[in-house]
Amino acid sequence: MNLEVTLGRLKLANPIMVASGTFGYAREMQEIVDVPRLGAVLPKTITAEPRIGNAPWRTVETSGGLLNAIGLDNDGVDAFLENHLPYLAKIGTAVVVSVAGRTEDDFVSLAARVGSQPGVSAIELNLSCPNVSGGIDFGTNAESCRSVVAAARAATDVPILAKLTPNVTKIADVAKGAADGGADAVCLINTVLGIAVDWRKRKPILGNGMGGLSGPAIKPIALRCVHQAATAVNIPIIGIGGIANIDDVMEFLVTGASAVQIGTANYYDPTVSTRLIDQLPAAIAEIGCSAVSDCVGTLSK
């Protein structure tokens, strides 16, 4: 059974990736997960300067999901390159570094610096964080998306993935903007904007007010976005949103995703990703395919 996938110029041993922000910097998971078996690891998003993130509360459980407003808390690119990348470069699988910026120049600078480092397989542009001021602008407009992707593409030779927000009117238009800008693949979706309320205090529970909803509750939205984008772009799609079992993985593949990222499920089931890799061959064979690529985009109309 051929589990290899090709995402533009990025080649992975299998389609099971772990989503940024849910797997730490991989070091935290090394005693629990057989990390080299994963298709790719995406460490926590980094920014040009250190960020302390949002005020607490930063997370709250909801029906079928998790609402978070972390605010891209991280130590900045300098600390990442010095303290985390040397370890990540030796973990035995592809490392896709997630970066976020407030301006196009931020994305360009980060792409240039990170992309020049050994051990970096690709860069994911986080164009869609819903709980950071200015963090969602590039993902809500097709031309802005195209511009920042093109600028980052020109700044580095490594593959570029564009992570997009579902909080738009036409996700297909923004995906096309990313493709036109030279993205090797688009990642769909980031979290869905939401709010949790303490009615007794008559206040939002999250310190930031609103946050991003992830987990099983958003899977139908993510599948819809993948389906719509698949009709608009000819570049690979990476599905994200509520994936927790092999049925979820296969739903994304047949809908049009060439790979998937496991996110919220890592919190309550840290070994889920490697288990999905074990289960994938049988699921592919069940529908008469002999490779992951045979399944992709086979949803009947």
Image (cartoon, rainbow, N blue to C red):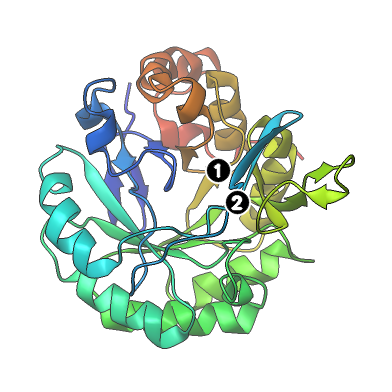
Name the one closer to the observer, 300 or 129.
Answer: 129
Q: What is the secondary structure assignment of the residue under circle 2?
A: loop
In the rendered structure, the answer to whether residue 1 lies left or right of residue 204 reads: left
Instruction: Give the position of the C terminus as an image quadrant.
Output: top right
Point 39% across, 36% down: residue = 15
In the rendered structure, the answer to whether residue 282 lies left or right of residue 120 reads: right
Above-or-below relation of 132 to 85:
below
Label for residue 189? 2
**Mark 2 vs mark 1, CA separation in Å:** 5 Å
Residue 137's x, y, as percent? Answer: 62, 76
Judge whether residue 284 can be spotted in this image: yes
Above-or-below relation of 240 to 216:
below
Above-or-below relation of 286 to 91:
above
Point 50% across, 16% down: residue = 283
Q: Which residue is mark 1?
A: 240
Q: Amino acid at mark 1?
A: Ile
Looking at the rendering, which quadrant does residue 290 occupy? top left
Residue 92's x, y, as percent? Answer: 14, 37
Residue 205's x, y, as percent? Answer: 73, 46
Q: Amino acid at mark 2?
A: Ile
- Please say if the residues under marks 2 and 1 sit with CB atoms less than 8 Å apart: yes
Looking at the rendering, which quadrant does residue 91 occupy? top left
